[in-house]
Amino acid sequence: MKMELSLQPQMLPPPPKTIPLDVVPIRIVPPKESPVMEIAKPKAAPVISHRPGLKGRRVCLLTNFFKVTVTGAMDDFYHYDISIFREDGSEVISKNVRRAVVEELSEMYKQELAGKRLVYDGAGSLFTLGPLPQNILEFSVVTEGKSFRKGSSVGGGGSPDRNDQKRRKLVTCFRTFKVVMSFVSQNSMKSFNERSLRVLNTILLHQACKKGCLVVGQSFFLHELANYIDLGGGVLGCRGFFSSFRSLQGGLFLNHDVSMTTTIQPGAVVDFLLNYQNVKTPFNIDWSKASRTLKNLRIRVKHLNQEFKITGLSERSCKEQKFPLKLRSERDSNRGNQTIQTTVYDYFVSTRAISLSYSENLPCINVGKPNRETFFPVELCFLVPLQRNKNELTVYQRTAMVTKSSQKPEDLLKILTDVSKRIKHEVETDPVLQSCGVMINTSLVQAEGRVLPAPRLKMGNGEHIIPRNGWWNNKDKKLLDPKKLENWVVVNFSTSCDVRNLFNEFAKVASAKGMVTCPPACVLDENPKNRKKLPSVRVDMMFQQLQSRFKQRPPKFIICLLSDKKFSDLYGPWKRKTLIEFGIQNQCLSTNKIDELYLINVLLKINMKLGGLNHAVVSELTRTIPLVSKIPTMILGIHVFHTSSGRAEAPSVASVVGSREWPKMSSYRASLRALPPKSQMIDSLFKPMSEQMDAGIIRELLKEFHSSSGQKKPAQIIIFRNGLSISQFKEFLNVEMDQIRKACSFLEANWRPKFTVIVSQRRHHTKFFEADLGANVPSGTTVDSKVCDVQCTNFYMCPHSARIGTSRPTHYHVLVDEIGFTSDDLQELIHSSSYMFQRCNRAISEVAPVRYARLAASMMSMAVKPEEMVNASQGYQLPKFHKNVASSMFFI
């Protein structure tokens, strides 16, 4: 009987025996069977399962992860908000000062804190293992420091009297701070989620700060000579380590990797400025530029044991810059102190007896406040180490950074193996982690990977080839769809180039590739008198020559010869003039090293810009790509380009490329917009101007797909979004994906294409090595288990073969999959797309549409000045393109 009862559905309680007088019963009428009455519930976007793929040759890999175990039950951590105020009520912003205050607080108030150790992130969060006595705590913290005697305007102000020179010029001062700590949350450490991992990583950060490390995110840099790489121009590359606890499919791990940043060259300020400005003597330094460069950098002064922050430079030279100096009279105290005007130079040479060899006619370093300036001669000032370089790197410096910092996989593996014991010791001897029972295994974690076979490619003359190790030899192969190069000219900015021989060789190489090249209409050489002028002026004058030769019909293509294309300051102004203002496709050549291989690579780019196709994946042409070739499918690549920290005020550039000419997957068109500086989300994907008009990016690319694909609308859209962190996934779905769906509905009310949304990440610290050889993984290596994230379907793929250093896989997260790919089908699609990039003869590290979007945005940032993207009335926008470029397939 009990069994029967347990199988019956749960019954509602019986109705009341009597109905209250004030209640009127409602008659329930059952609905008629009609489809109108059925309300369709919104379906959640399906995502492919976590089941790993099956295709490919299985390989055993080593990773740069260490297994973490926790012995015993870990107590909960308690999160507190911390605010630090000065005596005047202003909040302290400096992380160094805040850390010093918290360190002093933990020593002064051990009893009030119940002996709890404080783990501080340097900003506004503080963690303790177990709760503090109260939810809100307020403390008064007094710190000791050094300060100039009141009334002195120069570091070490004093009197010309000899006895006064022996007095301490810096006096001990005490500063009082108010610290308020408020309880925020209790973080359980039973499962390692985002909040608990934040606690563990803050412990690592707190540990590194105590050692005096420069902290950049979870990367830590020590001041050791062996860690520095000279990049030129007063900038050093600094090698450090990245350490982060991560909760992955295989459990809790410590991710450890080598990390790089750039710092200012420590040492004498003058030496730094000589290198930074590339001048030979201090008297050739541009001090107006130096003032901007030095501002906010920290220095130590030769005769004082204290750090100062540079606030500027003096308006006059050291021998002319005066300040009021108080003279103290010990003989007649009733007369008080006398104030005289003296120069900085006289004070240090005569009063302090400090010899100065070259500062007499140079500005002084100012470390004071606007209402109380404090000056030091420049030769007494020395930059302290580990100060991040916030200026934009030159192309030379970026190249040096890559070449000098790259490490072979064998060397990186040896470093990781050597530091494993040190990591174990540091983690397990940290008081907080020790009390948590955290243990580190010193063996590198092994993972299983699969090597996907390279896709078959089709070249010209119907020839098929199979790439090996992510590369194929195209020297004796013809282009698949070569275009004719006609009505073109040569512009020569180079001083030592035999143009006739160069283009005879160029024509031979083009002919061997199946490409017809007509002779150039003319060759325009730059006037030697213009070579010392500004780059933009040189480009303008060259176009004046061009316009005088082609008054009626401009050329269709221009080949521009630069002395050194990669480092040329002409590149940006040239691209702006040709593409944006005149709408002429062009290709720049470097004349430093030209051989057959270089010319072949140039021809690949030229043919693509002319609308040709260099090669194709066979499955693309035979329409055998699962779920894509049979149903009209559009592919989008989305990237947001940010300028370097040296141009923080410059707008960001949003770049979206969309596929065209379906069922092809190798042809793309780009659309770009300007965004506010450092914006992460694009706000112009859908931009309705009226009830009938949408000026957004998506409508533009959808119309291009429709017109180039036989008037077909895409029934499916695959989106590759680059550069988002896991914490931004939700915002992306709510902001950008919402715009994309609205753009589709705006174009046609009842049109609902299916979406598959994938985020690609290159900025991560996961590395793989072949377990047996310790070498780079083979091209096509895919890892989708153990060391992958647990939040959503994700996998690592390394389709390329690294030419320099250790290969870095791309990390793909599948956020939405309404199309319904299997793991194998989606991984095969992404792997094939890495071979569809038309500008080279090798697989690239990421999908082609993302690389195209990145290139378009990068080119635009070089071609357009930041101030040109700002419009007072309409916000941030790019200048209008020439109509020829606006309608072209692609314009890089």
Image (cartoon, rainbow, N blue to C red):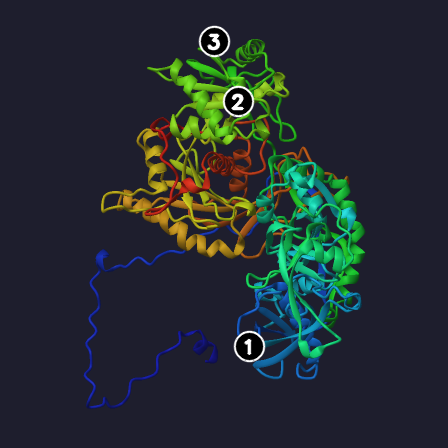
Of the numbered discs 2 and 3, the one sitting upstream in the chain is 3
| Disc marking residue 286 | none
* Residue bearing the label numbered 2: 604
Three-letter residue code for mark 1: Ser
Q: Residues within 10 Å of mark 1 (few under 14, many from 20)?
A: some
Of the numbered discs 2 and 1, the one sitting upstream in the chain is 1
Residue in the picture at 47% in, 77% down: 3
**Nearest the camera: 487 or 620?**
487
Q: Is residue 10 above or below residue 211?
A: below
Q: In this view, does 178 lie above or below 646?
A: below
Of the numbered discs 3 and 1, the one sitting upstream in the chain is 1
Three-letter residue code for mark 3: Pro
SS label for mark 2:
helix
* Residue bearing the label numbered 3: 519
Q: Residues within 10 Å of mark 2 (few under 14, many from 20)?
A: many
Three-letter residue code for mark 2: Leu
Q: Where is residue 168 in the image (x, y as percent from the top left)?
A: 76, 68
Q: Is residue 398 visible?
A: yes
Label 2 vs label 1: CA separation? 62 Å
SS label for mark 3:
loop
Q: Where is residue 123 in the image (x, y as percent from the top left)?
A: 58, 65
2 or 3: mark nearer the eye: 3
* Residue bearing the label numbered 1: 182
Residue in the picture at 55% in, 77% down: 182
Q: How crowded is mark 3: few (under 14 residues within 10 Å), some or many (20 or more)?
A: some
Q: Position of residue 57 (x, y in %)?
A: 65, 38
